[in-house]
Amino acid sequence: MRWKDRRQSVNVVDRRGAGGTIGIGGLIIGALVYYFMGGNPNDYVAQNAGNKQQQQVKPTDDNGRKFAAVILADTEDVWNDVFKTNGIIYQEPRLVLFTNLVQSSCGRAKSAVGPFYCPQDQQVYLDLGFFDQLSKSLAAEGDFAVAYVIAHEVGHHVQNLLGVEASFLEKQSIAGPRERNSLSIKMELQADCLAGVWAKLTDQEKNILEEGDIEEALNAASAVGDDRLQKAGGREVVPDSFTHGTSAQRVDAFKTGYRSGQTKDCLNTYK
Ligand SMILES: [Zn+2]
């Protein structure tokens, strides 16, 4: 996808280098593999963090930061427009870049939990090292996978602003365990659908994508673990139960938004 020389958002907060010094790359891949074998990635990280050689991640002003800022700007352009059309003001979220460990209003989170959105402070949290690892397994289409993940997180912000998140949480509070899980999946699929709306409208305006990019990137991106963090009793957040839906469901959800570019299709299909 084309992204160089485009507008970069001013809402990127760079907190890289502010955290610890644990090398995360191997841990993330290890945790993903462990997850696909049926384990809880946090267990893997807890077991292996102490064994890994420590390595400093350099907080340089790199292409990763610029890319994230361009994609965030794309989401601002799309959602400012969509909200304005509906007579609402879009409050732009901030994107916090970090390494290893970050403190959010939702609690403290390690890189290994993957990118996430915290509704309490309306910020998306992202460790670019996570994407380095993701991109390596993706060849040329890797950049779209990264863009999709950012757009998915911003989708959670849109859900928050529209009150959809609150209504999901209310339904969950009175639901049984199985229904709770299914509501959780719907909320994730809706965020995928909103990412599809973003892709469609951005592409319409700026011509950045080719159809072939999409499934490949989505399949790879669906390997990213859960990003919905729950506030735990203690100081650390815990990821909930990896309920994003299957890859096929996620591709479907993305395409629902991508086909029409209509936010209402996402709100109606996944509720
Ligand atoms: Zn999500």
Image (spheres, rainbow, N blue to C red):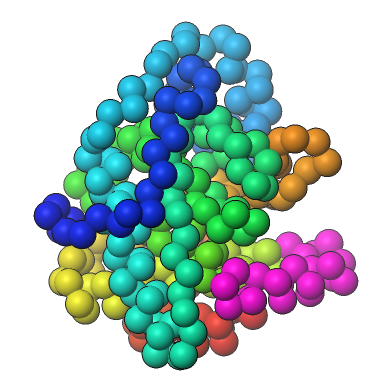
| Residue appearing at x 60%, y 69% in the figure | 160
Quarter assignment of residue 64: top left
Quarter of the image with the C terminus is bottom right
Q: Which residues are magenta?
A: 160-181
| Relative height, residue 248 to residue 89 (above, below) | above
Q: Is residue 176 magenta?
A: yes
Residue 38 image offset from top left, x and y in percent: 65, 39
Write the residue at 22% across / 73% down: 203
Residue 248, image x, y percentages: 48, 64
Does the rendering let one see residue 169?
yes
Q: Is residue 213 above or below residue 47?
A: below
- The outermost residue toward the left is 5
**Residue at position x 44%, y 65% in the image:** 92
Q: Is residue 216 visible?
A: no
Q: Residue at x 20, y 77 (%)?
A: 205
Position of 173 relative to 30 (above/below): below
Check residue 191 for magenta coloring. no
Q: Nearer the viewer, residue 5 or 195?
A: 5
